[in-house]
Each structure stands twice: as C-alpha cells, then as structure tokens.
Amino acid sequence: EREKEEKRKERAAKEEKRKAEKKAREEKREREKEERREREREREREREEQEKKRREPPRWLLEVDSEEITEDEHQHIPSFFGHRPHKKGAKDKEQPLDEAHRGVYLLVRKQLVQLWGKHKPVYLKKSRCLGLKGDIKVIGRVHSYLEHIGAINQGCAETQQQQAA
C-alpha cells in the first residue's frame, strides 16, 4: 500500500514537473514571439524613417546654389568633412579639411545634380561625369552618395536592375 502511494506521488511529481516544463516552454515561445514582433515593429519604424527621409529632399536639392551640407552628407562622405591624411602615406598626421575642399565638394555636387537634370531620365553613369571640374575620386564618391539618396538616377531602369542584383 505504501509503495503504491509513493509511486502515485512520484508519478504526480513527474506530471507536475512535465507541466511546469511545458508551461516554461510555452512562456519562452511567447516571449520569443513578442521579441520578434518588437524587432519587426522596430524595423518598420526604421523603414518609415528612411522613407520619410527619401520623401523630404534636402534643401540643396531644391535650391541648386545652396551651400547647405547636411549631417547625412557628413556621415556618408567623411573624407570631406572630417579629417584626412596630411600627405599621402602619412596616416598619423591628420589635418581638418579647409574651405577649399568644402567648395570642391559643393561644386561637384551642384554639377552632378545639374547634369542629371539635363539628361533625366537617362541613367547618369560615373564615366559620363569625367568632364566635370574636380578629382575623379571625388566625383565618384559624390555620385555614389547622390545615387544612394535618390538625388540622381531615381527611377532609371539601370538603377532598378542594379538594386535587384
């Protein structure tokens, strides 16, 4: 009789343990689901924020002669607005960029936006921009940035093919 009682208690304890483990697994799944939902909500907020930025063009895109340089430009092309090596190969000696470099950036940006305006909707390749005033590397970096934000080559078939690849 006592053995039966102990076995029954043992089975009951095992059953309780299984129920507790099952409940813990279910709670874990629910937490994971909630975390996934929260991550998805965060991604959606980020997408909306990016879309909002795309919808609101920078003032300089509307006013070609504007000398405004946005924080986004500072972040995407730091070599113009941060520091850069004083001499080639001397990476430890840095100096801030001066007004001349800022002027070069503004000139190249303006020229690219105007060139795109003239040839819209034909895709503006970097090679087509080689006749512009400015260093080839500078033109390439500014071209990439303008294309990234949709200031040039927006809606071109070539751009859409590149994005799909």
Image (spheres, rainbow, N blue to C red):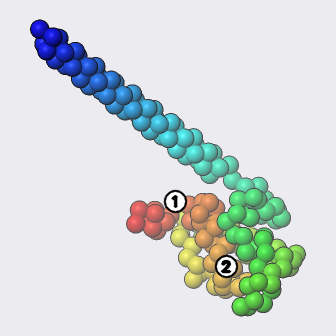
Residue ID for mark 1: 155
| Residue at 76%, 74% in the rendered image | 80
Point 62% across, 51% down: residue: 54
Q: Is residue 70 visible?
A: yes
Tally of numbered tags: 2
The amino acid sitting under disc 1 is Gly
Q: Amino acid type of disc 2?
A: Ile
Instruction: Kindly report the distance in space between the C-alpha atoms of the residues bearing marks 1 and 2.
Output: 21 Å
Task: Locate residue 141, reporting x and y percent.
Answer: 65, 75
Q: Residue at x 16, y 17 (%)?
A: 7
Res 62 visible: no
Instruction: Judge the density around disc 1: few (<14), some (14-19), many (≥20) Cα neighbours within 10 Å.
Output: few
Q: Nearer the viewer, residue 26 or 151?
A: 26
Q: Does residue 95 sit above or below 11 in this rendering?
A: below
Which residue position is annotated with label 2?
A: 139
Is residue 17 rendered to the left or right of residue 107? Answer: left
Residue 90 image point, x, y percent: 75, 89
Q: Relative to 51, is 133 above or below?
A: below
Find numbered disc 2 in the image and state the secondary structure of the residue it sits on. Answer: helix
Furthest-top residue in this view: 1
Q: Nearer the viewer, residue 109 or 12?
A: 12
Quarter occupied by the C terminus: bottom left
Q: Quadrant of residue 83?
A: bottom right
